[in-house]
Each structure stands twice: as C-alpha cells, then as structure tokens.
Image (cartoon, rainbow, N blue to C red):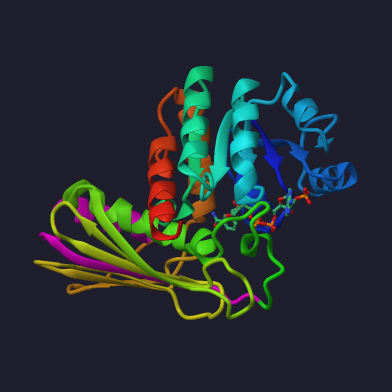
Amino acid sequence: MIRIGMMGTGSISRDALTPAIASVPGAQLWSVLSRDEQRASEFAAANGAASPTPGYADLDAFLADPDLDAVIVATPDGMHAEQTIAAANAGKHVLVEKPMATSVADADAMVSACAKAGVKLAVAYHMRWHVGHRLLAERVHGGAFGDIRTAHARWTFKAADSTNWRAHDDVGKWWGLAGVGTHSLDWLRWMLVPTCGEVTDVSSAITTGILGSDHDEVAAATLKFESGAIAQFVSSAVFLAPTRAEICASDDYAMCEETLGRSAGGRILTSAGALEFEEVDPYAGEIADFVDAIAQDREPEVGGEEGRRNVEILCALCP
Ligand SMILES: NC(=O)c1ccc[n+]([C@@H]2O[C@H](COP(=O)([O-])OP(=O)(O)OC[C@H]3O[C@@H](n4cnc5c(N)ncnc54)[C@H](OP(=O)(O)O)[C@@H]3O)[C@@H](O)[C@H]2O)c1
C-alpha cells in the first residue's frame, strides 16, 4: 500500500484526485497539508485519510511522518518547486500537478532533487489515461495514420473575474495556458513526438486585459516539429467552447470532440467511423501509474523531463 499525502485542498484535490486515490488498489490517502490545520483535518476526515494524525499546516511536520510514502502537489503552480524539492529531500515520491513549475530553472531543480533523492517524479497530465486517447495514440504511434501533417487542440474555460491566483504573479504565471493550455500541449506532444520528432519552432499570439489581468486570457500557439508537422492549440480563461482535438495525416484523420477535460467520455471519429472506447476515470489511471511506478521501481509514464519540456515551451510561448 502506497500512503499518499495530499498538498492543497482545492478543486482538483477534492473533485478528482482524492476520489481517484480511493478507487485505486494499492493507493491510500494518508494525510493532508493545508495553510490551515483545521481545513486539513476536515478535508482528511471527509475523504477518509488513514493516518492517526492526518491534518497538517506545517510542511516540515507533514513530510517528517515516516509512514508517508508519497505526496501529490496540488497547490498553485508557483509553489510546486519548493514543495516538490522539500518532499524529495524528505525521501517522498512526488506526483506534481501541471504545469510542474513556472520556470525552467525550477523544473530543472525539481528533476535534480528527485533524482538525487532517488524518488519518483511524475507530472499530472491525466489526459494520457483517457482510454479513447490511448487507443488513438497506439494507432498514431503504430503508423496507421501515415505521416502527420497537422494537429489541433482547443480547450478553454470562462472565469467570472480575475480574482483567481492564476491571473496574478504571486503564486501564478500563466492563466489559460496553465489552466488548460498545458494539457493541450501535452496531448499534442504525446501524439506527435514519437513519429514527428521534437518541437523545433514555436510562435504565439496572446491577448490580455479582457478581465483586467496581464496574464494570458486568450492564447493561440503554433508548434513546428522536426518532421515538418505543424500543431496549433488555443487556450483561454474568458470563453467556453466545446473542446476539440484533431490529427490530420497522410492516410487518415481523427477528430476528438469533448474528450479533453475531466471526464472519461466524448467522441472520437476517424475515416472508418467512431472509435469505440470504455469510459474509465483518467485520474484513476494517473494515480495507478504513479503507485505502480513506485512499487515496480520504474519511471512513471509522464516524468519530470517531459514536464520540464512542457514548461520550457510554455515559457517560449508566453515569457
Ligand atoms: N490535472 C488537472 O486536470 C487539473 C485541474 C485543475 C487544477 N490542476 C492543477 O492543480 C493545482 C491546483 O489547482 P486547483 O484548481 O485545485 O486550485 P485551487 O482550487 O485554487 O486550490 C489550490 C489549493 O492550494 C492551496 N494553496 C496554498 N497556497 C495558496 C495560495 N497562496 N493561493 C491559493 N491556494 C493556495 C489551497 O489549499 P489550502 O487552502 O488548504 O491551503 C487551495 O485550496 C494547480 O497546479 C493546477 O494547475 C490540475
């Protein structure tokens, strides 16, 4: 049993990660870290944390627990580096939320700290465990689509105002790009890099100020890969639209409607018709991969190097 400590009691911890931990054999919610000890204890109790002393407001005390095996860092993006490095130094394996950091230097320091401590570092791109996406990736990587020419992704959300931490510099850096754009970037890299090679050029157009933030409120990014394939994605914090992801290749195409998001559903169409897939919680797949990587002493499916590359591209798109 891998005993997991949750850092942060916000929306992703509450709505996706703790239910996923509860559903994965071999994973157990053990303890919780919050800025407020009572909130930590209440969150721990509400989600069945197993430690006899499950609620902490002090990072060092939380990490000093010898029964704690691993942590999930689900706090604002600008806090991930310090918390990940502290966890690694305490000998705990880390699953860090996306984007793993807000600078390449921080991502590098996280990768080094985990390598030095001999702990696993996984980055939480849950879209990789959407069963339809996995079937599609298998076909694309196996060559069934031929040579990829273009790929697209659009995933947006609509904030009511700019009070969220993502719209400010203290613990945020990017808004739409960090909320959802980083997932689209990961999806495109996952689908394309194995057959198209690395990203060689990037460009972007960024709009700010609609809700009064100077962080990206609408972003459009273009990526060129070694093979010549071109990918584009749009992220935004100021409008809601159906999510889309597409691949156009020499021998086939795929259109994914409403598959990007928190759900396991949506539709995927290729020239042969709909791709049938089972709807399985992608967050459960992410947690299962993390605990298997620890138990089997193997690298997690999305590790620190890939998370670092994502941050490097975000920095190039929106410095
Ligand atoms: N993979 C996904 O699908 C997905 C989806 C959403 C978010 N995320 C990622 O998960 C992380 C958390 O996002 P979230 O949407 O859960 O955010 P959120 O709802 O704002 O929660 C963040 C939590 O972090 C803690 N925190 C510590 N210092 C804070 C500060 N200065 N300001 C605000 N919160 C602070 C808070 O818990 P306490 O009050 O208990 O300290 C807060 O509840 C981010 O890195 C985000 O990108 C991933």
Image coords of residue 255 (percent x, y): 29, 73
Q: Is residue 156 visible?
A: no
Compared to 118, does 190 lie above or below? below
Q: Residue at x 67, y 72 (%)?
A: 162
Residue at image location 69% in from the left, 26% down from the top: 68
Q: How many marks?
A: 0
Quarter of the image containing the N terminus? top right
Q: Relative to residue 142, is residue 66 drawn left or right?
A: right
Residue shown at the point (56%, 66%) measured from the top left? 215
- Left/right of residue 42 with respect to residue 127 in the rendered view: right
Q: Which residues are magenta?
A: 131-159
Q: Which residue is rendered at x = 56% and y = 78% of the image?
A: 238
Instruction: Give the image location of residue 53, x and y in percent.
Output: 85, 30
State left or right for residue 306 relative to residue 163: left
Give residue 265's quadrant in the image.
Answer: bottom left
Q: Give residue 94's position: percent from left, percent from top.
A: 57, 33
Is residue 47 rendered magenta in the image? no
Q: Is residue 266 above or below residue 2?
A: below
